Image: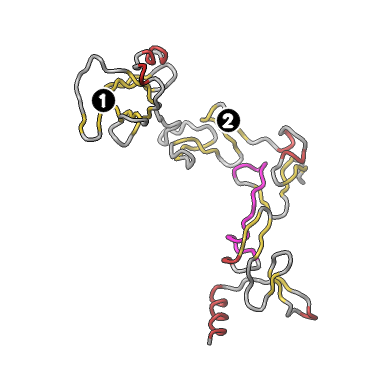
Amino acid sequence: MSASRDRTDIPPEKMNEKHELNEQRERICINVARDSYLPRHTSRGQGGEVTQVVERWSPDQEVRGSNPNIGRFICPMYVPLCDQASNQCVNGFCELQAANQQLGCTCFNGFIKDPASPLVCHPIPPCNLMPGAPDQQCLNGWCQMLYNGNFGCQCKQGFQLSVTNPNICENIDECTQGTSNCPSSACIDMPGDYMCSACYPGYTLSAAGKCQSSYGANGAQQTWQEPNPWLWAWMWDSMLF
């Protein structure tokens, strides 16, 4: 049964209405525009979509039975791309995808998904084999030859290599990693850097947005090192009493 043949069975007034398959209500084919429809029979078209022979359904009363005039409605079939038990993913594994909350392939580190085949992950090529000039191949970094003769991305300050794609440099969040020189509540993460909106007592905010002390040796300014939580609590209590 082809998809084109199935579509000819749709009533003209329903041709442009959007339908979807609701897995939470006994596989009800819902007309999300207005009405709802309950599938009585399921078959698959050549395009992989599911054709539902449906009968009218209302939220307060389900009408089940035989009706020779029931129309056919094509609903998108949300079939998982992979199965966790058999795992058809090549160079990857099957898991729930955060983007659409459906099962799909996640590539192993060092592999990237084939846009034409969602079940296949290919090894990520070295940056010198990617299209574009060397300074365009590595996001937030540059491509250069490594000590072992291979090519790889070197990241700018404040960035680090992505664990899923070594040809991309991701921002380092100094605020959440605790590597900033200001209280975490006053830390503002920025691409490749951070800024402080406030400092600990005895430290001043520099023009660069960093907390500095003027009590170093010979009056030299020192960068603040955030103390352990217990030490900060002791310092705060000593100021109050």
Q: Quadrant of residue 234?
A: bottom right
Q: Tell which residue pokes out farthest to the front in this image.
A: 13
Tell me which amino acid carries mark 1.
Answer: Arg
- Residue 135 horizontal/vertical position (percent): 77, 41
Which quarter shows the N terminus? top left
Q: Earlier in the sequence, mark 1 or mark 2?
A: 1
> Would residue 80 be found to the left or right of residue 141 on screen?
left
| Left or right of 155 on screen, residue 99 | left
| Residue 56 badge | 1
Instruction: Tell me residue 211's x, y (percent).
Output: 68, 70
- Figure quadrant of residue 37: top left
Observer-nearest of 33 and 231: 33
Label 1 crowd bin: few (<14), some (14–19), many (20+), radius 10 Å: some
- Residue 48, image x, y percentages: 42, 21
Q: Looking at the picture, tell me which residue is in the foreground, 183 or 147.
A: 183
Q: Pinpoint residue 218: horizontal percent, then vertical percent.
A: 80, 81
The residue segment tinted magenta is 164-180
Residue where numbered disc 2 is placed: 114
Q: Is residue 207 above or below residue 102?
A: below
Disc 1 versus disc 2: nearer the observer: 1
